[in-house]
Image: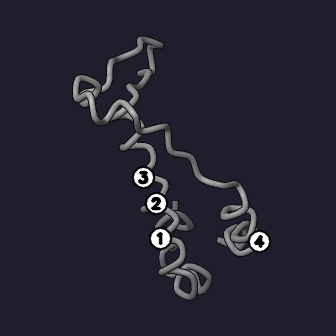
Amino acid sequence: IKNLRTIGKSGVSSALGMELSFITATAVFCVVANMMFHGYQDFTGAMHPAPLASVPVLNTIKQLSLPAFTFSIGMPALSLL
């Protein structure tokens, strides 16, 4: 538990704080946007319709995804956390 409490004080997270924040915010945006425009599946396996699916203009938006390259660059530094 001590290690989990001090993870924010790591030199790696201090040095890469801006990059980690950007990647995390981008991933959260993609998840929320996909949930709002394309629906989502909950932990019980039930599919829920998208809240914004009834807006005709927004039906043309395709699902968002992140390239794996972004995460493969940061993997060596993230493994030090």
Dot 1 crowding, Cα within 10 Å, few <14, some 14–19, many 20+: few
Identify which residue is drawn at 31% across, 36% down: 58
Cα distance in 3D space between marks 3 and 2: 5 Å
The answer to whether marks 1 and 3 mark residues whose Cβ atoms lie closer than 8 Å is no
Identify which residue is drawn at 23% across, 23% down: 54
- Residue closer to the observer: 17 or 31: 31
Query: For the residue labelled by badge 3, is the local secondary structure a helix, a strand or a loop?
Result: helix
Say if 59 sits above or below 17 in the image: above
The answer to whether marks 4 and 1 mark residues whose Cβ atoms lie closer than 8 Å is no
Counting residues from the start of the chain, the first of labels 1 and 3 encountered is 1
Name which quarter of the figure residue 74 lies in.
Answer: bottom right
| Residue under numbered circle 3 | 28
Identify which residue is drawn at 47% across, 13% down: 45
Left or right of 36 in this view: 63: right
Check disc 1 and give the amino acid type.
Phe
Left or right of 37 in this view: 21: right
Say if 45 sits above or below 12 in the image: above
Cα distance in 3D space between marks 4 and 3: 22 Å
Query: For the residue labelled by badge 4, is the local secondary structure a helix, a strand or a loop?
Result: helix
| Residue under numbered circle 1 | 22
Point out the image quarter for the C terminus: bottom right
Check disc 4 and give the amino acid type.
Pro
| Residue under numbered circle 2 | 26
Cα distance in 3D space between marks 2 and 1: 6 Å
Residue 51 placement (x, y as % from top left): 24, 27
Cα distance in 3D space between marks 1 and 3: 10 Å
Query: For the residue labelled by badge 2, is the local secondary structure a helix, a strand or a loop?
Result: helix
| Residue under numbered circle 4 | 76
Counting residues from the start of the chain, the first of labels 4 and 3 encountered is 3
The answer to whether marks 3 and 2 mark residues whose Cβ atoms lie closer than 8 Å is yes
